[in-house]
Amino acid sequence: MDNLVDHIPPHAILSVLVVDLGDLTCIEASASDFCAEGCKVTSNKIAKINDLIGLRVTGLEKMIKGRVVTSSEDWAEIKFEFKNTEVRERRRERRRQVRIPVTVSNRARSISLECLIVDASPSGCRLKGADLHYLPDEVSLKIVGLDLPVKGQIVWRKSHFAGVRMLWQFSSSAEVAKKSVVQGNGGLGSPNLPKG
């Protein structure tokens, strides 16, 4: 992470997408105060975010996993979590009822179905849709509001429902360290510098 932090101007503000891994809510936000341990995100919708998040930064192929450590109505302090980057299934995870449109396809994208995510947790979700039996076990989910697909594995099917284990892929500290926000093409994008 040192290379990333070294290339962010002290007062830089970056546009990011915050993904609540508990209920798959996506919120556009501004990120600032980057350091090796985390950053601060600001949005008038940040109070809707639960504790475990993915931070989508332009230029990185994967999200950065993080945890909300302090928050208010319009900002949250995020601590990056680079260790144990795979969310593991825990039966005690709280499932949240949601209604999120999603396109589910096989990895080759030759089969594609429009479905609805009806409940979610950091490790999985429940899909509702017709013809789910046509999908293989290994799927890709294109969630509304998130610009990259999430890999998943169907673990059960029943009538018009299917349970999917989310195979989140998060950036490692080494992958993040290779990027620089002040690079031209191929970097993490240009920072938005505050006026005044």
Image (spheres, rainbow, N blue to C red):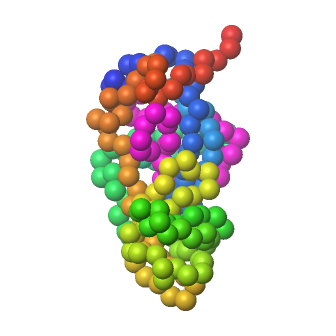
- At 50% from the left edge and 42% from the top edge, which residue is drawn? 56
Asked whether, in this view, residue 62 is left or right of residue 41, the answer is left
- At 33% from the left edge and 25% from the top edge, which residue is drawn? 2
Is residue 145 covered in magenta?
A: no
Viewport quadrant of the C terminus: top right
User: Magenta span covers which residues?
Assistant: 34-63
Farthest-out residue, bottom = 159
Image quadrant in which you'd find residue 160: bottom right
Farthest-out residue, top = 196
Image x and y of residue 7, in percent: 41, 18
Q: Nearer the viewer, residue 176 or 61?
A: 61
- At 37% from the left edge and 28% from the top edge, which residue is drawn? 179
Viewport quadrant of the N terminus: top left
Q: Total label count?
A: 0
Asked whether, in this view, residue 58 is left or right of residue 45, the answer is left
Image quadrant in which you'd find residue 15: top right
- 180 versus 126 height, above or below: above
Q: Nearer the viewer, residue 18 or 178?
A: 178
Image x and y of residue 112, in percent: 53, 68
Image x and y of residue 185, in percent: 46, 23
Image x and y of residue 183, in percent: 43, 19
